[in-house]
Image (cartoon, grey):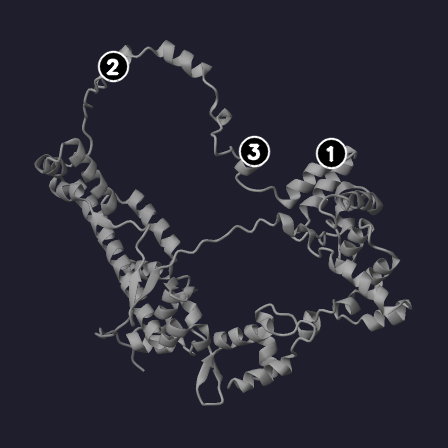
Amino acid sequence: MAMEMRQELRLSQQLVMTPQLQQAIKLLQLSRMELADLVHEEMLENPILEDDMETAAERARERELLGGDEQAVMQMESAGNTEMPVEMPKVEGEGQVEVRADSQAVNEIDWENYLDNYTMAAPMPAYRGDSEEMPSLEATLTKPPSLQDHLAWQLKLSDLTEQQMAIGHDIIGNIDADGYFKDPPLSEIAADHGVTEEACEVVLEKIQTFDPIGVGARSLAECMLIQALHDDLADAIVIKIIKSHLPNLEKKNYQAIARDLKVPIEDILDASKVVTEFDPRPGREYASDDAHYITPDVHIHKVGDKYFVVPNDDGLPKLKISNFYKSAMGSGNASKDYVQDKLRSAQWLIRSIQQRQRTIIKVSESILKFQREFFDKGISHLKPLILRDVAEDIGMHESTVSRVTTNKYVHTPQGIFELKFFFNSGISRTNGDDLASEAVKSKIKEIVGGEDTKRPHSDQKIVELLKKGGIDIARRTVAKYREQMGILSSSKRKQVF
């Protein structure tokens, strides 16, 4: 077969991920706070970008300084001069000093007299008004002390050797947020310090006497036992229950505990009351879970019978192109190329942000159309919805809708929700309609909240109650939703006393 070389011309279409398209996709999936940080970084790197709100405030200050002379302000803006020496007006009166742009007024101030009066004055914290008190020193801390800080402070006050102090710091550093010492084992810490495991056990027992009581335990039983030994109400029955019958206590199987310990059921109930007052997580008092504040991207307002979707632009800079750099484009080839490059980058950023806002509004309006009953009546009327429904409604791809609804929040008359919240699978109803899974969870939570705590509903009973309300659901589905909401089983929800 002969080989030959020839040229062919083929036409094909393909999607090219240009830098501008990549930037638009990146902006679309950012949260509101991440977008604000990115815009501020771009304003620092790109001198073409300006915040229109800041420039408006600067113009207002300039008008005030120039006595409302609009022509002078316009001349300053056209010249690109944002700084000017200002001579402050002279204020008549005793003890007043005329302030000028030069350094003449500096010599007129009696600095020695000023420093004498300043050093003789009382410090600011010493002042206390009639109706207010200065905060305590603890209230001025930037963050509360952690569990490790609290334990390390007690360790320093202990009568331990230098080597025991080092072992104690290693143990404290491995105590988790709940106050338990689970990993690594003492044998590993002993090998690191070249001592026996019994020597590390002595230090651990010392730490287990620290506040909060129960800290440093290696299991729930040990944590409860430490607290029982420090409790005056704990007796031998309490200690036996902790050592051997915690599973039966969890299941509230008091009869089995009474038979094994050969004591009256009343004594078991009294001992169980003491055990239930112990804290299974002694370190929770020092948990440093900071609050996360949510700023909605969109507001949905109800006016009469109509809803209006409004973007939330508060806190976001209103970007514009600087007039000063526009006028610098003709000053030279090098500066012209630089300004043109930055100008294109600024224009693409502004367009991408505007496109992002329009897309979020479109998705929010589509969600509002599908979930109108939720906005009118509440979560019990939430309908099943998938990304494809919204994507087909607004003529976009599912991946675009997924990016828009991730980490975006909407403020509604029913509260603040993530846009992902409105997408749920459907549960069949006896009347033929479907109900969203979140609405079913709300029904289960309502049923559990209204039950008798001494005779809680089983999962099968919840299924029967839901069926009476027209919701056809399996028992295993009820158990799954109950676990997702953190609701215990009926045996663990039961209260005997």
Mark sitting earlier along the chain (2/3) = 2
Q: Residue furthest left?
A: 71
Quadrant showing the N terminus: bottom left
Q: Residues within 10 Å of mark 2 (few under 14, many from 20)?
A: few
Rounded to the nearest angstrom, the CA distance separating label 2 from label 3 is 41 Å
SS at badge 1: loop
Which circle marks residue 137 in the picture?
Answer: 3
Q: Residue 327's image quarter? A: top left
Q: Residue at x 38, y 63 (%)?
A: 410
Residue drawn at point x = 63 percent, y = 79 percent: 459
Mark 1 or mark 2: whose residue is earlier in sequence: 2
- Image position of 89 with respect to 140: above or below: above
Residue 77 in view (yes/no):
yes
**Residue 67 quadrant:** top left
Badge number at residue 340: none
Q: Amino acid at mark 1?
A: Leu
Give the secondary structure at mark 2.
helix
Mark 1 touches mark 2? (CB < 8 Å)? no
Measured as percent of width and height from the top left, residue 197 is found at 82, 47
Residue where numbered disc 2 is placed: 105
Q: Nearer the viewer, mark 1 or mark 2?
A: 2
Give me the C-alpha separation between circle 1 and circle 2.
Answer: 58 Å
Q: Is residue 466 left or right of residue 248?
A: left
Q: Is there a contact, CB below 8 Å, between mark 2 and mark 3?
A: no
User: In the image, what residue occupies the spot 82% across and 61% down?
Assistant: 271
Compare residues 454 and 84 and report the one nearer the observer: 454
Residue 157 numbered tag: 1
Amino acid type of disc 2?
Answer: Ala
Question: Residue 175's spot in the image, x, y percent?
Answer: 69, 49
Q: Nearer the viewer, residue 249 or 30?
A: 249
Q: Specify whether residue 15 is in view.
A: no
